[in-house]
Amino acid sequence: MLISTLSARRTFGALGMVAALALVGCGPKDDAPATKGGPISLRRLTEPEYRQIIADVFGTTIKVPGRFEPDIRDNGLIAVGTSRESVAGTGFEQYDLTARGIAAQVVDDAHRATLIPCTPAKATDRDDACASQFIARTGRLLFRRPLTQQELQTNVKDAGESAAKLKSFYGGLELSVAAMLVSPQFLFRQEVSQPDPDNAGQRRLDPYSTASRLSFFLWDSTPDTELLDAAANGDLNTDKGIARQVDRMVKSPRLASGVRAYFSDMLGFDGFASLAKDPQIYPKYSSQVAADAQEQTLRTLTDLLVTNNGDYRDIFTTRKTYLTRLLGSVYQVPVTTSTGWEPHEYAEGDPRAGILMEISFVALHSHPGRSSPTIRGKALREVFLCQKVPDPPGNVNFALVQDTKNPAFHTARARLEAHRTQATCQGCHKIMDPAGLAMENFDSAGGFRATENGTPIDTSGDIDGVKFGDVIGFTKAVRDNPSVPSCLVTRLYSFGTGRPATKDEAEWLSYQGKQFAASGYKVPELMRRIASSKAFYRVSTPGTEANNASLSMAGTTTQTEAVK
Amino acid sequence: MSATMNATRRNVLRGMMGGAAVSVGLPFLDCFLNTNGTALAATGAPLPVAFGTFFWGCGLNPGRWEPKTLGKGYDMNIETAALQPFRDRMNIISGMKVFLDGKGARPHFTGEMAILTGDVPREQPNYASLDSIVADSIGTRTRFRSLEVTGTGKPTDSLSRRSASVSNPAEISPAALYTRVFGPDFTDPNSADFKPDPRVMVRRSVLSGVTDQREALLKQVGASDRQRLDEYFTAVRQLEQQLDLQLQKPAPLAACSSPGQPVDAEIGTEIDHVVANHKLFAQILAHAVACDQTHVTNVVFGEATSPLRQAGTAMTHHIYTHEEPMDPKLGYQPHATYFMGRIVETLAFYLQTLDSIKEGDGTLLDRSLILAHSETGFAKIHALENIPMFLAGGAGGKIKTGMHIKMDGEPVTRVGLTVQQSLGVPVDSWGTMSLNTSKPISEIMV
């Protein structure tokens, strides 16, 4: 119900805008500062993207076997790292195995009737006409553009020759599907630029690259038929045409997939794949708890940000969440439903407010057997405030922290204070520790504790000059930290473009930050603005590479000064 | 096929697919492979050299691992005592360091990068790793260019990289590694009957269709993306090569046998499980080399911030190195040192496994060169000097063994250069800035 009401409101807004502009006779008004664009990107598909595409193109009953080459994180995002990734021999072997596993299912008895649009004259021989029909249709979705005449011919010929050799039409088609799934056109999102029809001398993405950028940004998947049609008929060459597609996509329930993909990336959920907790210390922690914990946070976020179109900053303070019975046992909250999810609202004053206090944050940023205020503080700075905390120096004895059983230092706060007496360590720990210490009520697996080694845990402190008395005060201080919204704007933009923002784009980002604030920090609206902007599709022209110097994360020195 | 020169691999293969005689040695092999000569026992030529790395994090305790005497006839120190049986078959190199050239040290990362890529990167790695450079020289004719494993459950802990943008992820499960090497795609060189699989032939042909687009695609992208696409095509060629080998009858290898299906210990960071899985890996890797499936192997005993732990304890090896007080009586950190002992013990088992495979007069260890090293000297302070580095095996007669060589203040890259030059990589210097060196460790070179 909520979705439809909101959608309706958005439709009116969009229609109103289009109507007004039609009178003026130019594209939608874009007051944003002009940008020179950044380098074009060649991105390797991530594992979630790969899986989502297979589900969208071939259906959710197709299993994706095998494992994937790990992704690189760059400037806080895997989406940016993918612009640096390639494929090694080992990785290609895996892609090949996965592709063959998928292809075999696509042509098997259970799927061929629905996935292959025609029946061959003879199942034991080639049928180029039928193969061509299937390959053209599937190829367009996998390559995110129509196949070229030559690509189509080669694929049909390969399928035919293989079919003849194997005496099986479907065997030939299977090889053809497998070949498409290991081809560079599928595994890499190669963007292509063209001269900007509206701005002489400048370049922008071509329509199919525009379609891909839109679709991966908003829906985390390959463009659907309608979007590809809009690319084919030239709609995506115009701001108006783009705005129309953006409007359709932002209103679609699939926007939640895009929001989930962004936050999974930003929150570093890939880290759960290798997260271990000591089973003797944390017997409740399991891989199912880890999976539920990620889902909990993503549900909390999509419910707040998409379904309720809420204020982004409230992610730190919201008392509403979703729980399974398993999570309830860790959080010590009774969950009545025995399977699945139920909404839960913490009482006013409960320390469990906001996503920072969920397992997906406190457990992900801890040691296997104990919490780590330093790691948590560093994660908060880097993930939510886009600040880079430097690594500790080399050849320096920073090991003053004593044994956890040392009678003189019962709590992490006491141990870290001893450690911070060293001048070389002090600068960075001052940035990280206060935030981390505020979360010390939560152990390495996300359980609550009021004391450590019998001593009450003190969660007071200050962050960037704002003092707080307890963890509730801390979540409020984070919520109101000015870096929170600006970090989201910058990072979301990078997520969509697959590159760090350039220095030249700083002014544009700051403009979008103001618009974001004016909108009441609504994330779908921010995504709509980014996806409809000129900047999002602008590509730097050759010879202006100097503009491509990236906008690095806020400097540490400045941060240290700001903290004092 | 016509007499014109249109002998692309695809056309050759197509021609053969049309005909009935498929069991010929495929002629295109010689067209595109490094014809360095797979020297096989059957032909009387020497067996190829195998190169391996064995990495562990958090170093060893200074003063407790370096032999007290220099040169030959040294005795192993306390922490390397498990290696005593191999004293005359290996070299210990102590005292080497990493130069930062004003760049910041990234604890645990800088050291491994310097040793394996000859460079101290500011952020991401900039160059291919030593094993990849060596693999391009000695590993191009095998099914696998290299095999990577790690016993602590994270494929990304692999340190093997083909370039700045491509890393070779590690296998974390011995059972999965076994299936990959000795599973259905393995052709037993000692098996009497051999029939090429028609499905492999059509796959081979279809892959050529991918490769044929290389030139056209490379033209469409900028320089840095071109390099990345080129790496992709190199990967495709490697798979093509694997398929080619599956279509050929391999030469018999007396020492080749299957290691048998392993049963994984639990995959994680608990030390007993990690050691058990590394012992399984050792068996599979040794057999893979004996069966000529690869010439290059990389073992990572957990990432540099060593996650090893004992069941039921909160502390990891890495945390112990920093936070455990020095025992005043012992003069070292007993818990951290415990893990070092388990690591060296596993290395000794690995060498023992290589040595247990007899080949003619020698063993697999004799024709191997294993570079075992950490990334720091004294982990407590992230020391970038006196990093433990061992070179085990005779590299098929190309390396002299049995020495302790002290190289105080010398760049770690001298080891990498020595490895490359001994294994036939045409290079006269290696490393960036102060890590650049043109001096191999000549004392051990033949």
Image (tube, rainbow, N blue to C red):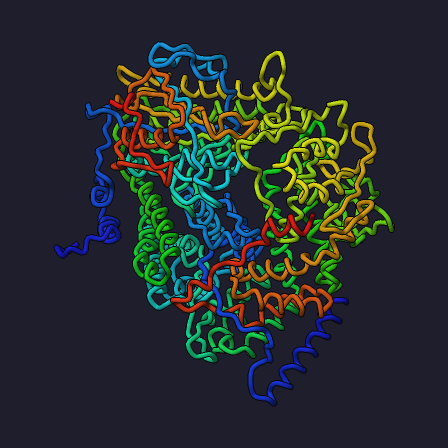
In this view of the protein, can residue A92 be seen by the observer? no
User: Is A508 placed left or right of B354 in the picture?
Assistant: right
Closer-to-camera residue (A222/A491) = A491
Report the residue that reaches farthest toward the bottom: A23
Q: Residue at x 50, y 43 (%)?
A: A66
Report the residue that reaches farthest toward the left: B3
Q: Quadrant of the N terminus of chain A?
A: bottom right
| On screen, residue A409 above or below A462 | above
Closer-to-camera residue (B150/A72) = A72
Q: Position of residue B25 (x, y in %)?
A: 22, 39
User: Is A43 placed left or right of A392 in the picture?
Assistant: left
Q: Residue at x 36, y 52 (%)?
A: B227
Closer-to-camera residue (B421/B435) = B435
Closer-to-camera residue (B323/B51) = B323
Q: Residue at x 62, y 49 (%)?
A: A382
Q: Position of residue B367 (x, y in %)?
A: 30, 23
Q: Position of residue B158 (x, y in %)?
A: 47, 36
| On screen, residue B287 above or below A513 | above
